[in-house]
Amino acid sequence: MLNIYQTNKVRIISASQESVDTKLLRLEFIDSEIKKNFHFLPGQFVQIGLPGWGECPISICSSPNDSETFFELAIRDIGVLTNKLNSLSAGDCVDIRGPFGNGFDVDLFKGKPLLLVGGGCGFVPLRPLIIDYLAGRLESKTLQILYGCASEETMLFKKNHAAWNRRAELKVILEKPSTNWKGDRGLVTDLLGRIKISAQTVAVLVGPPVMYRFVIKELKHKKLSDENIILSLEKRMHCGIGVCQHCAIGPFYVCKDGPVFRWLDIKDYYSL
Amino acid sequence: MNNEIQVFLNKLSEEFFLFAPQQDGAVINIKEVRDIGDVDWSGRMPTNTWKALFLPAREKMFDISDGRLVKSKTSQPKIAAIGVNVVDLKALTLLELVFSRDVYYQERRCNTLIIGYSSSWPNDYKKYKIFSHNFEEDILEHLIFDIFIAQFAVGRMKIYSGSEKGQHILEEGGIKDYEHIEFAGPISEKGPDKKMLLLKKKMESSQGKRIWHELNKICIACGKCSINCPTCFCFDLEDSVDPDNPERVRKWGSCFYNDFSLVAGGGKELDTVSKKIFFWYYHKFVRIPFEYMMPGCVGCGRCSKVCPVGIKIEEVLKKV
Ligand code: SF4
Ligand code: SF4
Ligand code: FES
C-alpha cells in the first residue's frame, strides 16, 4: 500500500532572492521516474518540508508545461520552516509531497475576459496562468492583471512584469511605495474602480481575506456572477488529503476540494 | 459469560493481547485483560473509547536518518478488542472508511481482531438512548467486526462471524455453531439514515443561531469532548526536535485547541469558542454525513459525560 505521507526528494536547481522576504526555488525531483511523472495544474500546491522541520503547503508558481524539467515555488520567510528553506542554496535537497488540490479549471476561462487579482504574496498561484496565457495555452479572450502589494521591496516577479504587460494588461499598485515610485499608490481595490470590467468577466482572486471582502463587493457591483468569481484559499494544513480536518471550510476541504473555489460554492461558508 | 466463550478467549490470549471493558471503581473502562473473569459483560458504555487501539494518541510515522524520512519499522502487536458494543462498532466502521488509504491504520488493523458484543440483542439502541441515527434490523450487515456475540434478552446466545479472519479464528477456537454475515458496506440498502439526514439539514442552516452564542459563554474549549469521542479523529503531523530521536509523528489534535487553525503569519480561522464548537458539530453532523453518508456522531453520550461545564449534546441538538 502506498504511503501517502512519504515524501520525495527534490534538488534545488537555483534559489534566487525574489523580494526582500521571498525566495524563488527552482526544483527537480532526484528520481528520474518521479520527475517524468510529475504533472500538475495551475493553482495546485505541494507540501514542502525538511525532515525535522515539518511541512507546509506552497502553491506551485511555474507553468505545468515545464513540469518534466522543473517546477518553482516562491517561499516567503514567515516561520521557522520557511526561514530554514530560504537559507538553502542550489544543490541542497528538500522534501515534497503532492501535488494536491483541484487547481484552476481553465475551461471556465474559454472565450471570456479573464481578470486576475492578486494581493501580497497571494499573487504566487496566478503566475502559472499568466505564463500559460502568454504562451497561447490559455483560451481566455483577454487578460487583465491587478497586483497590489506593500512596496517595491516586497513586489514579486518584477523581472517578468514588462513581458506580461506586452500581451496582457498589468497594473501594479503599492500601498507604501518609495518616493521614486511612479505608479499607482493605494490598495488593489482602488484599481478595480478605475478599470472597465465587463459582466462576462471571469475573475480569479488570490490574496488575504480582507482583500476578498472588498474585491468581491466591487465585482458584484460590476455585475459579475458568483460562479465567475474564483478564489484560492489559504489554510493551515497537515495531511493534504482531506482527513486531518485542519483546513475544513463548511462541508469542504481546502486541501482536497480546493484550494480553488467558485464564490458560488463557498459563499455560505466563508465570512467576508 | 458461558464456558465455551471463556475457553475460547483463554485460547485467544495465547496469540493476542486482549482488551475489554472492565469494572474500574465506579465506571467501566476499556483496558488490557489480565484475567478473563474481569471482563465486564453488562453492556454498560465504557468511559473511554477503543480508538487509541486503532489510532494511537501519538504514533511514530517516520524515523529521520541522514535527513531522510524512513518509515518506522515497529511491528504492530496482535490485539483483540473484545466486547465492542454496536455503537462503538459503528464508530470503528467510520474510522475504517476515513483511514482506508492510510498505511499505518491498515497495518495496525491487519493485526487486530474485533469481537463485537451485545448484552441485550437487539435492544441495545434503546438501552444506549441513541439520538443521532435510527436502529435498523440489518445493522450487523453494515458494521465491521470479525466476530460478534449476541446475547439475547431471553438467555439465548448467538455467534456471528463478520470476516474470513473471524471465521478462521472461531473454527480454530473450536466454535462451530456460528452464522456468517457478509459486510454489505456501511450504508443500508434503504439509503442513508433518515435521522442523520434530518440532523444534517438542521445543522446546515443553524449558523448564527442563538445556541452558538450561548455556548460561546459556557464552553471553556477544553477539548475533553473531542478527546473522549470515539469518532473524533483530527490529527497533527509533527516533527520531533529531539536530537537523539528525530522522528515525524502523528498526534491526536482537537479543533478546540488554539493552534488548530493557526496559519503562519498569525491568522486564525477559529478565533472564538463559538466558532470552534460550531466547527466541531459541523464536522459530526454535516461534513461526515456529506462525505461518507454515515453519522459522524454515533450517539454514545461520552462527550456529555466528560464535559466539565455540563454541555449535553442532545440538548444542543434540540436547539440547532
Ligand atoms: S468538553 Fe465541554 S467545555 Fe470542554 S470543549 Fe467540549 S463542550 Fe466545551
Ligand atoms: S455522543 Fe458525543 S462522544 Fe459520542 S459520538 Fe456523539 S459526539 Fe462523539
Ligand atoms: S490538510 Fe488535512 S484535511 Fe486538509
Image (tube, rainbow, N blue to C red):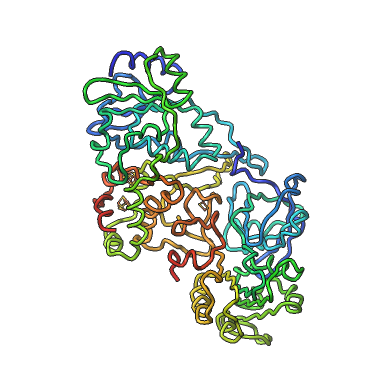
Residue drawn at x 24%, y 51% is B310
Q: Quadrant of the C terminus of chain B?
A: bottom left
Residue B166, how many percent across, how many down?
44, 23
Task: From this view, report whether residue B5 is shown above or below residue A154.
Answer: above
Residue A210, how many percent across, how many down?
50, 73
Q: Is residue B151 left or right of residue B200?
A: left
Residue drawn at x 64%, y 64% is A107
Quarter location, residue A200: bottom right
Residue closer to the observer: B229 or B115: B115
Residue closer to the observer: B16 or B156: B156
Q: Quadrant of the N terminus of chain B?
A: top left
Residue drawn at x 66%, y 86% is A183
Q: Is residue B102 left or right of residue B175?
A: right
Task: From this view, report whether residue A90 is shown above or below residue B138.
Answer: below
Residue closer to the observer: B146 or A214: B146
Q: Residue furthest front?
A: B190
Quarter location, residue B127: top left
Q: Is residue B217 left or right of residue B255?
A: left
Residue B74, how many percent across, how many down?
55, 31
Residue B195, how many percent across, how many down?
31, 48
Task: From this view, report whether residue B241 is shown above or below residue A255.
Answer: above
